[in-house]
Amino acid sequence: MEENNFSKSFFVKCILLTVIVTALITSMITIIISNNTGNKDLIEKIETKLGIVQANIDADYLGEIDENKILESTVKGYVAGLGDEYSEYFTKEELEEYKSNNIEGAYVGIGVYIIQDVENNAIRVIAPIAESPAEEAGIRPGDYIVKIDGEEVTGEDIEEASNKMKGEEGSKVKLQILRGEETIDLEVERKNVKVNHVESEIYEDKIGYLKIASFDENCSVEFEEKLEELQSKNIESLIIDLRNNGGGIVDEALAIADLFTDKDATLLITKDKEGNEEVRKSKTDEKVDLPVIVLTNENTASASELLVGVLKDYNIATSVGTVTFGKGVIQELLTLPDESGLKITTNEYYTPNGNKINKIGIEPDEKVELPDEYKNVLNVPKDKDTQLNKAIELLK
């Protein structure tokens, strides 16, 4: 009698489980169809595969089912299956967090720019933000973050990792860093981090210097203000430092490029999956007529490469340093009907002369390496900064 009651109970649970999983599959297929109506074969294969998985779960799975987690994980897996490190699916909560972390101003965290290293499936540090907890703790460009609070993280976890390093001011996060063959354990206190987009200085022989940390909102306004300050002090040439600048908002980089080019000059060429081209052009007349050197390294990426491409193609600037990162694609962030989000790569961009950037990068006119002991150091002493000193030499 007891065995018979168990069988009935198990049978009822299986029916309920079948209904739940079937509903989830239907929901997922509906979402995919709405975004991918032209690939019915793939939809059918997914439905068949999930049906097999569902049958095995119905028969043998012991445990509770979180319907929403299954649905969200399934869609995340579909997007991850694209194999594109820049495309990502966000739950509603993740999308809100992502948007709040990508607006201008201060935020609470450790202050570090990171990127997904696809080749090693790892999270690589582009650079700590100046005067941030990350810089104070000794985190360097080129470091790999391998654990956060004792949990291993990979390149695929980059958004989750970014969120874990943010938090309440005064709280601490434990990081494990891989630097070459050395493993370093750090405890970093989260603080209010202010992003300073542009730093300025004047060197001997009236050489102006502007370092752009990232192309965040209003970066172009800050750049122009700092440039006008330098011009008011009668600079005769300019160095633009884009080393360790991982990119940001394309329009901000274009607004800066606009300052150096004639009206209606081509600044950016983008192509979609069908090969359709869109050309972005300068909106104003040239405002800056100075000899320019631009500094680059392997962490100069995305919008930074866009600016380098404009300055080089129009012979406005000579580039000094090492080959750039090679991210020449643009992502679009979509808000789906249920307020979840989808960030997908939609366009590849090219320099005004039609040169490809993605997976290639931009070669410098003057290749100059930093001394080995300073290659992964954020603040290189001026007398050891071979790239900066080469730029100064050329402008003299």
Image (cartoon, rainbow, N blue to C red):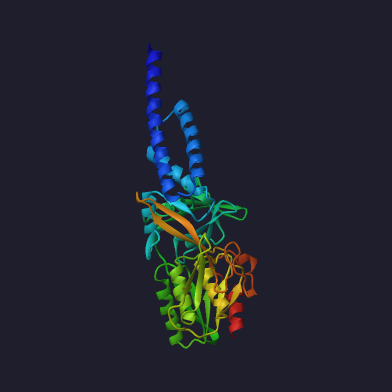
Whether residue 139 is visible here, answered yes or no, is no
Which quadrant of the view contains residue 373? bottom right
Between 22 and 251, which is closer to the camera in this rendering?
22
Residue 333 percent location from the top left of the image: 42, 58
Residue 252 percent location from the top left of the image: 44, 71
Between 35 and 126, which is closer to the camera in this rendering?
35
Q: Quadrant of the N terminus?
A: top left
Residue 87 percent location from the top left of the image: 48, 54
Q: Residue furthest left?
A: 338
Whether residue 47 is visible here, answered yes or no, is yes
Residue 375 percent location from the top left of the image: 60, 65
What is the total number of numbered labels drawn onto the structure image? 0
Q: Residue furthest bottom?
A: 234
Which quadrant of the view contains residue 366? bottom right
Question: What residue is at 51 percent from the left and 43 percent from the top?
Answer: 41
Q: Is residue 91 left or right of residue 207?
A: left
Between 195 and 217, which is closer to the camera in this rendering?
217
Q: Quadrant of the C terminus?
A: bottom right
Question: What residue is at 47 percent from the left and 34 percent from the top?
Answer: 51
Which quadrant of the view contains residue 14? top left
Residue 363 vertical position relative to residue 45 in the rendered view, above or below: below
Q: Is residue 317 left or right of residue 333?
A: right
Residue 381 vertical position relative to residue 230 in the rendered view, above or below: above
Q: Is residue 292 left or right of residue 193?
A: right
Question: What residue is at 38 percent from the left and 13 percent from the top?
Answer: 2
Between 275 and 252, which is closer to the camera in this rendering?
275
Residue 48 vertical position relative to residue 177 in the rendered view, above or below: above
